Image: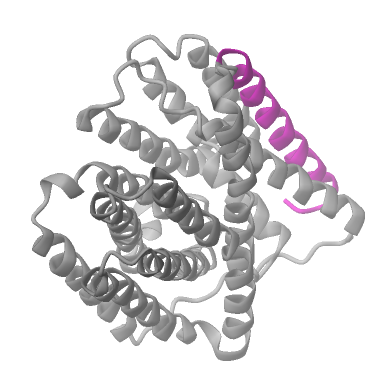
Amino acid sequence: MNMKLLINRNLIIFTFLHFLVDFICVGTLFLFANILNDEPIINVGVIFLLYNCFAFLLQPIFGYLVDLLVTKYHKTILKPLLLFVVAGLIFGQLIIVFLFNRLIIVFYIGAFLLAVNNALFHVVGGKEILSSSYKATPGGIFVCSGAIGVGLGTIIINNLPLQLFLFITPFIMVILSIIFASNKKETEQIVYPQYKSEKSSLSVLVVLFICFAVLVRSFLGFYSTMSSVINTWATIFLLSVAVCVGKAIGGIILDLAGPYFLIVVSTAISIISSLFIHVSYFDYIYLIAFNLLMPLTLDALRYLFPNKEGFAFGLAAGFLIPGYLLGTILKPYGLQNIIIPIICLLTGILLFLSYYLKRKNNHV
């Protein structure tokens, strides 16, 4: 596998933009939390919940619409869409922050604007990257940088000059978006193979298996920060790096060794490391191993929805929220020691069955 052919300018741009978008969104939310420190904690919690729900649940809808626009106008439509997203994020971050007068409604509006533009960016980026290569490596590289953005957005806002956060970060986003939009050479969209048979009921079952696997992965993700010391910036950053590394190398392993090898290795290491998750460094091993499967779910869904990569990407994101909410509800009961190995095994079984059924349905 020639990495030089897979890592092109657009992939680098969107990967760095993914980091900046998640960094600016999460950082702004924590800035809101600092400003609202005298408000009841429920208000801050609802703002974060509002952001997360809209940022993820809107992605299937936006992905479907982006696919329709690309079908009509080709991939050139992604350039103005990306510029629109960046403008929206800058408005959501800069204008809302400067307009606040300790009115809680302003913060709700700000969180909603950030969520909408975050959701649109993800499906625009997902469409560009997933539709430009048959390989899974670019998708893994694109999604991995968001973890670093979330981690840094969580920890750095109290240690960063406000001017740097409010002006320089958006400025870099604008420059990168203009570079992408100014490229006159269009990336070709991959042509999916024609299959001899279409067993629609089996295809639906495969999609359900994969989506449920994504759901339980998200549920487990809520238990992922199991380090014995998670109140230091270094630990939070290392946890983010572990997630990033897992997603990045997951696509590479998938391309080199195939889905079955990746599923078995990821599941086995995840289960073993989860049994020692409270021991130092095992939580990082667990996070790397479990996140190896992220690019695999994206790769499977885009082949199940040929030429609808935006919807495929958004569908995977949309199923993260139910699992996240379930994890939020159950975490206080302290069931993680029992749940984590079981969910790791269940995820592996679901994805293994998905690929087996996908092969029977001639989707490989």
Camera-side residue of 181 and 148: 148
Quarter occupied by residue 227: top left
* 350 is within the stretch colored magenta: yes
Q: Residue at x 47, y 69 (%)?
A: 116
Residue 199 in view of the camera: no
Q: Main secondary structure of the magenta part?
A: helix
Answer with left or right where residue 226 lies relative to residue 212: left
Q: Residue at x 11, y 51 (%)?
A: 160
Camera-side residue of 48 and 268: 48
Q: Looking at the picture, how far across and down is residue 223, in whole percent?
A: 50, 27
Decide: is 289 above or below 311: above
Start-end of magenta stretch: 337-364
Answer with left or right where residue 27 lies relative to residue 74: left
Q: Looking at the picture, how far across and down is residue 75, in whole percent?
A: 50, 82
Decide: is 269 above or below 3: above
Residue 331 in view of the camera: yes
Quarter occupied by residue 218: top right
Q: Residue at x 81, y 62 (%)?
A: 195
